[in-house]
Image (cartoon, coloured by chain):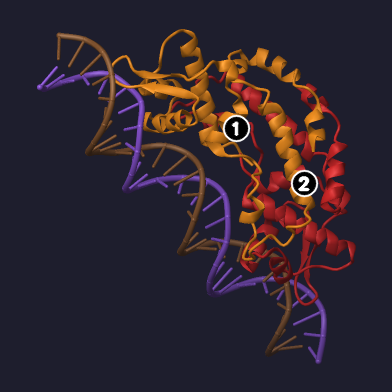
Chain colours: A red, B orange, C purple, D brown
Amino acid sequence: MKLSANEEYGVRCLVRLAYATEAGGALTIPEISQAEGVSPAYAAKILRVLRKGGFIKAARGKEGGYKLARPAGTIVIGHVLDALGGRLFESDFCDSHTGQATICTRSVDCSVRSLWRAVQVAVDQVLSKATLRDLLQNEREMNSWVRTIPGPSALRVM
Amino acid sequence: MKLSANEEYGVRCLVRLAYATEAGGALTIPEISQAEGVSPAYAAKILRVLRKGGFIKAARGKEGGYKLARPAGTIVIGHVLDALGGRLFESDFCDSHTGQATICTRSVDCSVRSLWRAVQVAVDQVLSKATLRDLLQNEREMNSWVRTIPGPSALRVM
DNA sequence: CCCAATCTGTACTTTATAGTCAAGATTGCC
DNA sequence: GGCAATCTTGACTATAAAGTACAGATTGGG
């Protein structure tokens, strides 16, 4: 249960692009790679995932580069992370952790699965509320924003 | 941001051992490995982590095997996961995602870091409340238990 | 004391993720 | 058309996580 490199750098690239798009310009791979301190090739790989996810659009040739595909306020960070690294607990998780058996020995009744679902809900509670626009603040403002996330009501959805 | 295999199988082994300890007996590696459908060698590897974490104790020789080191109600799942797979967002995370730079280009002010902290708090909110004892229920009972987790008050701790 | 049952530790192989490389395709400008 | 800037793609290498193998150490029983 760790943040993957894809998730971290992917979100950072989006933040850079959001600032640039706000200022009316596009960013090229060399610009983004230098800003984040990663190689151009790796930046390109991450940007590809973001493009395929529909979050950014690219233009080739001179004056080309990347921009957000839609307003920052409509880009939900939870969706971005789904594209970059998958979910914490996916529906097929139990099927892929059966050991040598063909189905998990607890498939019909599993308290552990119930706990994982609860964790997933808690994570979604935060990430479904956060948009790229919310990340265009300084750290102190962001800390305040976080406190506005409503209760554990999402936990009651189950 | 995915559950690791260590985390999944580690918790499952603990649940098996909790049931066995309740019934007064110990479980051997072959027993546990067969119950979970993993190889004995792999079960042994996971059990080692749990032992080093102080959650279980082992006895060798005939009549040997594993038992919980302390009552299930005192074993917090959050602590177990820390031992098995580390935390979502560790304090040194930014230091290890600097690309080729020596420090992250945003080290002094990073809204993304603030969001990750919020996610970590949301996860801890659930996992610090859950003990191994809570997992000794069927899935339906566990779903009810999850709903009793108090609000997002933990989010205000920041 | 010897043997069988059991855990322990280290080293190994396999697979997934992280990160690189090079050739190709598009665009705009002259 | 030709060139330079730019993105695109697939294959490649390196590192970390998952999973295996095996020799060694401990315990209890006959």
Depth check: B128 or B42 in front? B128
Relative side of B27 to A9, left or right: left
Single out the mark in the foreground, 2 or 1.
2
Query: Are marks 2 and 1 in one subunit?
Result: no
Q: Position of residue A77 (x, y in %)?
A: 78, 46
What amino acid does circle 2 point to? Ser
Residue B87 placed where, x, y %?
A: 62, 39
Residue in view at x 79 percent, y 37 percent: A126
What label sits on residue B114 in the rendered view? Answer: 2
| Chain ID, mark 1 | A
Q: Quick one: SS at disc 1?
A: loop
**Is residue B38 rendered to the left or right of residue A127?**
left
Residue B149 in sight: yes
Q: Nearer the viewer, residue C12 or B14?
A: B14
The location of residue D26, given as percent across then percent down, is: 28, 25
Relative to residue B55, is residue B139 depicted above or below?
A: above
State the SS at label 2.
helix
Q: Answer yes or no: do the residues labelled 2 and 1 have beta carbons within 8 Å?
A: no
Q: Residue at x 54, y 15 (%)?
A: B71
Identify the image quadrant of residue A86. top right
**Where does residue A1 sit, x and y in percent of width and height?**
61, 39
- Look at mark 1 in the image and give the residue it sits on: A92
Rendered view: A21 above or below A155: below
Residue A109 seen from this side? no
Please tell me the numbered disc located at residue A59: none
